[in-house]
Amino acid sequence: MISLLARRGLILLCVALLAGCDTIVLNPSGDIAAQQSKLIVISTLLMLIIIIPVIFLTLFFAWRYRQSNTSAKYDPEWDHSTKLELIIWGAPLLIIIVLGMLTWISTHTLDPYRKLSRLDENRPLAANVKPLVVEVVALDWKWLFIYPEQGVATVNELIAPVDVPVHFRITASTVMNSFYVPALAGQIYAMPGMETQLNAVINKAGTYDGFSANYSGAGFSDMRFKFHGMTQENFNQWVQTTKAEKLNLNRAAYLEVEKPSIKDPVRRYGSVDADLFHAILNRCVGADQICMDKLMSMDVNVKPVSKANEKVVSMLAQNQQAARGSDAEVCTTPPVTIGK
């Protein structure tokens, strides 16, 4: 038998280990993440309504009908109980109905594309409040954040004012990735040639972790950034300080940033090309590339004549080849730069 002291020691050890756990998902600082955390808690409690009785009854039956207990009733002819069937099937059915209702409501309420209607559970959002727009690009293996209205950009650093709705426009340069700040909202996929969106708000000032939640290659584990929530005044000061930076994120500079690298330091750009995100999204940053939206428009309007179709297909092939480079090969590993 384990002594009382040893048992207490094991309990304290478990508590000490749990103390090192990061519970940011259940205690977030953004309203969207807070609503999502409540869903996790409610779903867990509903499932425990089944799990706890099952575990208890399993142990109870093992003890009650043990071989040495001769007083327990033995009925080898028993095969059916209406009451038991109602409990076995009724309880899970009710839980599924409740979970279905929660899923239906929350799917629409927490739609990442839906504009925010509140700052938190006690403060509605005024209809005339304009959100901060941030364009997010997942690169190999770093994050690029463009602030089109402020005309600045950063690498591996995200800034947002407290209690101001933020509208994220998200894409990727190469492979599929996932943008995730646990304190802010759930993860959203980033895909090349496609745009996903997220509307969220941070309610507490602080520094939070952000990272990629989708494996994307060699530098995936170091694809992290810091998200800083700050007051509006501090955000305005940060914008002015960043504008003073000499670095300019034009198309040529972006092509350098886009090259695979690991553990990139934070970089700030004092100016950004106005149409850079559009070019990244439509795969036409290079001077000799045709934007995908233009190609699709040409494809829609082209007449169903073989020569015309061949022209569009040829242009698309040339565009893809230009994106890869004349000497590029499929399935090759590009050179990687590792930062300090």
Image: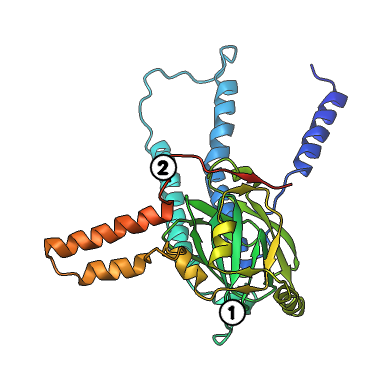
Res 93 seen here: yes
Quadrant of res 82: top left
Q: In the rendering, at what x and y percent does residue 336 appear?
A: 59, 44
Separation of disc 2 and disc 1 at Cα?
A: 38 Å
Q: Residue at x 49, y 74 (%)?
A: 275
The residue most toward the top is 68
Q: Is residue 120 above or below residue 328?
A: below
Is 268 situated left or right of 301 in this image?
right
Q: Is residue 291 left or right of residue 73?
A: left
Identify the image's colour scheme: rainbow, by chain, secondary structure or one colour: rainbow
Residue drawn at the location 79% of the way across and 16% of the way down: 1
SS for tag 2? loop
Image position, residue 217 (x, y; %): 54, 42
Residue under numbered circle 2:
329
Most distant residue in the left direction: 305
Q: Amino acid at mark 1?
A: Glu
> Vertical placement of 28 versus 221: above or below?
below
Q: Nearer the viewer, residue 279 or 34?
A: 279
Percent x, y of residue 8:
84, 30
The residue positioned farthest toward the right in the image shown: 5
Q: Is residue 39 something one can see in this rendering?
A: no
* Relative horizontal placement of residue 13, taking residue 31 as reference (left or right): right
Q: In this view of the protein, which residue sits in the foreground, 168 or 34?
A: 168
Towards the viewer: 189 or 109: 189
Across and down, in percent, residue 107 comes to 45, 62
Eye-nearest disc, 2 or 1: 2
Q: What residue is at 77 percent from the left and 35 percent from the top?
A: 14
The quadrant in which residue 208 appears is bottom right
Which disc number belongs to residue 149? 1
Density class for disc 2 (Cα within 10 Å; few <14, some 14-19, many ≥20) is: few
Considering the numbered disc 1 on the image, is that residue within a helix, a strand or a loop? loop
Return the residue nearer the eye: 68 or 243. Answer: 243
